[in-house]
Image: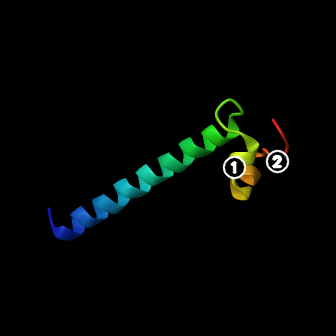
């Protein structure tokens, strides 16, 4: 494999891993059993629709 192919593969794998981590984090933020509203950032609250208590 050329260096360019390895670089492209690394970028693709990193993008997939990063996207997965973000999606898992948002699922946890959306679940009231795993997170408190006061611990979420404003962006997380807006994305997962947890503006109010509970």
Question: The N terminus lies in which quarter of the figure?
Answer: bottom left
Say which residue label 2 marks: 51
Examine the rendered structure and indicate whether residue 19 appears above or below residue 24.
below
Considering every residue shown, the one lying at the far left of the view is 1
Nearest-to-viewer mark from 2 and 1: 1
Name the quarter where the C terminus is drawn.
top right
Q: How is the image coloured?
A: rainbow
Q: Secondary structure at mark 1?
A: loop
Kind of element beneath mark 2: loop
Q: Are marks 2 and 1 in contact (CB under 8 Å)?
A: no
Residue at the image position 23 percent from the left and 70 percent from the top: 4
Q: Residue at x 78, y 46 (%)?
A: 49
Please give the label number shown on residue 11.
none
**Side of 28 where 14 appears, left or right:** left
Q: Quadrant of residue 14?
A: bottom left
Give x and y (percent) for residue 18.
Answer: 46, 53
Q: Which of the 4 image quadrants contains residue 6? A: bottom left
Q: Position of residue 37 (x, y in %)?
A: 75, 43
Q: Residues within 10 Å of mark 1 (few under 14, many from 20)?
A: some
- Residue 41 to residue 30: above or below: below
Residue in view at x 84 percent, y 40 percent: 53
Residue at the limit of the structure toward the right, as seen here: 52
Mark 2 / mark 1, whichever is N-terminal:
1
**Which residue is the site of mark 1?**
40
- Residue pushed farthest front? 38
Foreground residue, 38 or 27?
A: 38
- Give the left or right position of residue 43, taking residue 15 as reference: right
Query: Could you tell whether 52 is left or right of 15 in the image?
Result: right
């Amino acid at each position: 494999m050329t260096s360019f192919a390895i670089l492209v593969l690394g970028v693709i794998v990193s993008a997939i891993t990063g996207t997965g981590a973000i999606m898992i984090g948002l699922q946890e933020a959306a679940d009231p059993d795993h997170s408190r509203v006061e611990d979420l950032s404003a962006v997380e609250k807006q994305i997962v629709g947890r503006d109010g208590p509970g």
